[in-house]
Image (spheres, rainbow, N blue to C red):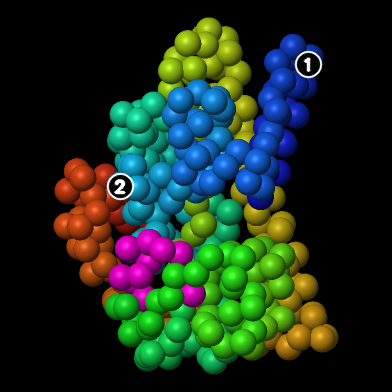
Amino acid sequence: MQYEYAEEFAERIKEKTDGAITVEPYEYDGGLGSESDQVELLQNGGVQMAVMSPGFTGGMVKEGQMFALQFLFPDSVEKTQEILTNSEALNEDLRKRYEEFNISPLAFWTEGAMQWTSSTPIEEPGDFENFKMRTQDSPLILESYKAYGADPTPMSWSELYIALDNGTVQGQENPIFFIGDASFHEVQDYMTLSNHNNYVAMTTVNTDWYEGLGQDEQQLIDETVEEMQSWVFEEQKRENDEFLEQIKNDTKHSTEIIELTEEQRQAFKDLAVPVRDFYREEVSTVNGKILDKLVKEIEEAQE
């Protein structure tokens, strides 16, 4: 979805300037190096803009890791998108942290809610007991699954399908469109609609380059990024809805869909919330102040 975002952004800039300004998108296919290489390119101006997960920068801007905290955002993806768009904690405070490293996030947005797929049903925390869960190699994600009693197992994306098929790991997490596109449902018996997190992306620019632009050019970029917030929300909704229907209607591979009640989600959340203390103590370099402000904004948005 990030590349589709870049293509749409490029087309809008081209149309608005009658082709006078062009944007050349590059896919994350290894052509620009690893994730860390791409972050470095953005920092030093090798590329001027990038759409990426905050997790790419988690080793540099520790606060960017907070998006890995589970049950932080609302169950509603629409409400989450509103918070990401309007949050002062993210769009001002977190942006300032990134700008210390010559990166300016212009927008945060969701690619959809994260769901669990598994070889056995997941309906309560006890179902994770001794369960081998594939995860990214993130301290917060590892800590979250340990809190549920699971055995979190970091593994690369390229190895995952085979590992699920042969039982090396028993489950994984991703938005529905990732699950469907990668055909993980073919080798998993269950998909739990947990909405335990959102896959967050951010639109970023090289700070020095951006600040060196004229006012009209900055305004063009800012306005287009703002327009893209509604576009990308509808796009992720369409893709996730379509893949959910495909998974439900796949006659060759039967995947049982489990929908958690609010009480069931709360049982997981009760175990996930204390992981925020781990973040404050072990991860954040500003004592969790940005997280605490974001939590307050989320609570106020749901009142």
The span picked out in magenta is: 134-145
Q: Nearer the viewer, mark 1 or mark 2?
A: 2
Mark closest to the chain's N terminus, 1 or 2: 1
Specify the amino acid type for callout 2: Lys
Element at badge 1?
A: loop
Residue 55 position within the rendered picture, expressed as x and y whole percent measured from the top left: 43, 51
**For residue 118, side relative to residue 178 (left or right):** left
Q: Nearer the viewer, residue 102 or 32?
A: 32
Which residue in the structure is indicated by mark 2? 62
Question: Residue drawn at (34%, 42%), measured in percent from left and top?
Answer: 60
Above or below: residue 126 compared with residue 289: below
**For residue 293, side relative to residue 16 (left or right):** left
Q: Is residue 107 visible?
A: no
Q: Residues within 10 Å of mark 2 (few under 14, many from 20)?
A: some
**For residue 168, side relative to residue 231 (left or right):** left
Kindly indicate the quadrant of the structure image that contains residue 117.
bottom right
Circle number at residue 19: 1
Question: Residue drawn at (60%, 18%), measured in percent from left and top?
Answer: 220
